[in-house]
Image (spheres, grey):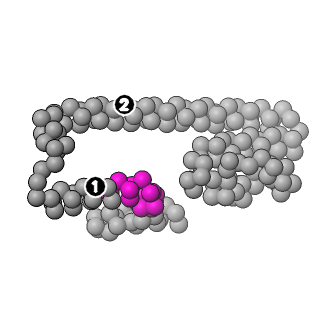
Amino acid sequence: SHTFHHHTQAEMPFWRILLFWSGTCLKEISTDMLVWLTIIIYAGIRISANTLDYVPESVELLEKTNIGVLGGFLSFFLVLFVNQTNGRFLEMYGFSKACSGRIQDVAGVARTQLPSELGARLVRHFNAAQVAGYVGLNAIGHGSPYSKAHFFDVYNEANCLLTPEEMKELDRHDMDD
């Protein structure tokens, strides 16, 4: 169903794809006060610039400066920021894949060398720990999809990772904070 939904979205006309609200950053941007404050300040400056009959002295000073240098610096720092962010993502992805590999290693040993019930419980706990690790990447206070309710609880219910008693024990540790 989920895959079918994305498949049908990809086959829609271009203008319909552009107008999607869910699965985009538009909701976050539309509720961010800093974005609105910046737009209001920009609109205020443009309105005042178009209603004034004279050129303020501060604007005359800007004519003598090279604004292109500022754009160059901003572009340079933007590239550095994106590169650093991408590097952190790739590092976290590598850790996640390594963790997944170690869980598979332990699962193989646990299921063959330990009593059946103990081995299964150990594997469930390791898988729950990995899913909880993704909740740890949650942007605290920003309603990220990696929250306990929207990520951990969904995977726990679908895969029976922790029993209700184990969940009660885990609830004293607030995953979202």
The residue where tag 2 is placed is 80
Find out whether residue 30 is within the magenta segment.
yes
- In three-dimensional space, the C-alpha distance between marks 1 and 2, rounded to whole angstroms, equals 26 Å
Query: Disc 1 vs disc 2: Cβ atoms closer than 8 Å?
Result: no
The residue where tag 1 is placed is 42
Of residues 137 and 41, the one nearer the viewer is: 41
Kindly report the secondary structure that dominates the magenta region of the rendered protein.
Answer: helix
In the image, the segment drawn in magenta is 24-39
Find out whether residue 136 is within the magenta segment.
no
Q: Where residue 17 sits in the image (x, y, percent)?
A: 34, 64
Q: Is residue 25 visible?
A: no
Of residues 42 and 157, the one nearer the viewer is: 42
Q: Is residue 114 left or right of residue 86?
A: right
Q: Where residue 140 sits in the image (x, y, percent)?
A: 60, 48
In the rendered image, which quarter is residue 112 located in? top right
Of residues 69 and 41, the one nearer the viewer is: 41
Q: Is residue 68 left or right of residue 163?
A: left
Q: Is residue 117 visible?
A: yes
Name the amino acid type tagged 1.
Tyr
Q: Is residue 7 left or right of residue 133?
A: left
Q: Residues within 10 Å of mark 1 (few under 14, many from 20)?
A: few
Q: Residue at x 56, y 53 (%)?
A: 142
Q: Where residue 67 sits in the image (x, y, percent)?
A: 18, 37
